[in-house]
Structure formats: C-alpha cells, structure tokens
Amino acid sequence: MSQIGNPIYASCSIGKYVSSGATCCVNVLTCGAGQYYSSGKCISCDAGKYNPSFGSTSSSACLACAAGNYSSSGASSCKICAAGSVTNTLSSSGATSCKPCGPGTYSNSSTIACQSCAAGTYNPNSYGTNDSSCLVCAPGSYTDKLGGTGGTTCSVCSAGSISTSSQISCQSCAAGKYNPSLGQTACLDCAAGSVTDRLENLGGTSCTPCNAGYSSPSSQVACAICGHGTYASSAGSSSCQLCAAGTYNNMNGSTSSLDCLACPVGKYSMQARRHATNVRLEATQARKARQRALGVQSANLVHKSVLLLLQYACLAT
C-alpha cells in the first residue's frame, strides 16, 4: 500500500490511508489487543511481551512482562506461573514460559525463584508448591545435603552413629558406647566385661571382651588390668577376683588363682580389701591371742585407720 503520488493522500485523516489507485480514504486496519499494525497487516507481539490496547500502530506498544510473569506470542496480558514453577527468566522481565521447581525446592504462586528446602528436610519431587513439600528424614537418617539446604533424599546413618528426627547429620556414638547397625536412633552400652572396638574414641560399632587378667564394668572405654592381690581367669570379666585369705599375689594382670601363692610359714594374710579398716580388727585380735599363748605381754596398740587396697604380701605373725 502506498500513499506516494496519490492526490487523495494529503486529505486522509489520521487513522485512514489510500492504496494505490484508490479514489478515497479508507480506515486503517484495526488490530486487536496483543497486536500492532505494520505494513498493512497486524503483527502479534513477541512472546514475553503483551499489549492490552486495540488499534496499536507500533511495536513499542508491546510491553515486556514483569519479573515473575510470562506470556506467549500475541498476548494481551501476562500470566503468573502456577505454584511449583517459576518463569524461565527468574527475576528478569520478559519471560516466555514456566519451568518446574526441581527436587529439593518448592515455590508458591507468582514467585521469581524456587525456594530451597530447609536444612534437615528434603523434597524428592519436582513441582513442590510450599514448604510442606519438604519432608523430614525419618529417625536414623539424614539428608544428602547434611547441614545445607535443598536436600533431595535421605540416607541412613552408618554403624557407629545415630540421628533423631529432623537432624542435619549423624552423630557418632560417644566413647564407651556403640551401634552395630544402620539407621539407628540410640547408641548402646557394652555389657560388663567388654569395651567398644574404638576404646576411648567415638563411633564404636561393636563390643570386645576384656582379656583374662583384665576387667571392665559396663560402658567403659578401656579394660582395667587386675592389680596386686587379684586375678581374672577368663575373658569378659566384669571384676577381678580377690586372692583368698592366706595367699598373696604381687603381680599385675594375673589370669589364674594359681598366681595367688600361699604365705610362707610364720606369715599370714587376710583376703584383700577395698575399704578403710582399723588395725584392731581380726588380725590384731588374732595377734593378741597368739601373744598370750606365748606368754608375751600384750603391747599397747595404736589405733590407726588404713586403706588395705590389695594383699600383695604376707604379714609376719
């Protein structure tokens, strides 16, 4: 269509034109919303833009969709992405489509970015619509992101560690405790007479019996060697046995009652004791009796409180 050289063109009012050979002015083609007029035809606004007006005659009438909104070609208005998705340009304007929020994320309606699941939670699916889409790992497990956000799966805690609900990582069993299985929520105490395979270190996975000559009460980090006057004849002992009265043992780590030797002639021993006592107990009384039998006058005895820990030597009569 051309107005050049047409004598009628000069008299056409705005919004009218003449075509070649025309004898009168005619109305310009009226383009609808989402379009504009150019070169005798209506042209659709590009995707990512919109035009709410009718009769536009310039591409400048097509406006970019605001961030968080999108449009396809020829749009008269922009749309918002459904919950669980965001625009392909995220925080930029002129989006042309929506894309899903991936695993580990979610989105409310009309947001410009997917939100990551909080630390300790996960989302294995796409199109999460709110934070309720992020789940808590079951007790005994943790998210693949550990202390980070955006978890997509849960993994079970390994042996030697545990977790309670909604933990961001597994915790190693404390020294003296153990856990032999995957996915557990509590560590266990070793039975009396045994210690963990990690001894004083964290993360025990099993219990090991104490060797003969050693003992351990429950939940200890190491086996204790049997001291003077005691012995442990078998593995897994919870305590060391005391040598019998009339015997002694001056060795550590004894493994048999045969290590408790009989006192020589003229000497004696009481069974080893682990508490404070007075020298006027049975031994003193027995000594007095022997002295009287020998015709020896009893001497004045000083009262003392002593700690007889282990009987490792015989006393003179």
Image: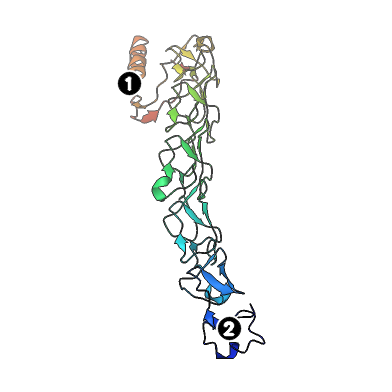
The numbered mark at residue 281 is 1
**2 and 1 marks in contact (CB < 8 Å):** no
Measured in 3D between alpha carbons, the distance from the residue under mark 2 to the one under mark 1, in whole angstroms, is 144 Å
**Amino acid under disc 2:** Thr
Q: Earlier in the sequence, mark 2 or mark 1?
A: 2
Split into 4 quadrants, where in the image is the C terminus?
A: top left
Residue drawn at (53%, 75%) of the image: 61
Occupied quadrant, residue 298: top left
- Side (left or right) of 271 relative to 47: left
Residue 94 at x, y = what percent?
55, 66
Residue drawn at (55%, 18%) of the image: 211
Residue 260 at x, y = what percent?
51, 12
Q: Is residue 131 visible?
A: yes
> Which marked residue is nearer to the observer: mark 2 or mark 1?
2
- Side (left or right) of 282 relative to 20: left
- Side (left or right) of 153 relative to 308: right
The numbered mark at residue 178 is none
Element at label 2: loop
**Amino acid under disc 1:** Leu
Residue density around tag 2, few if under 14, some if 14–19, many if 20 or more, within 10 Å: few
Instruction: Examine the rendered structure and indicate whether residue 14 appears above or below residue 253.
Output: below
The residue at the far right in this view is 5
Q: Which residue is mark 2?
A: 23
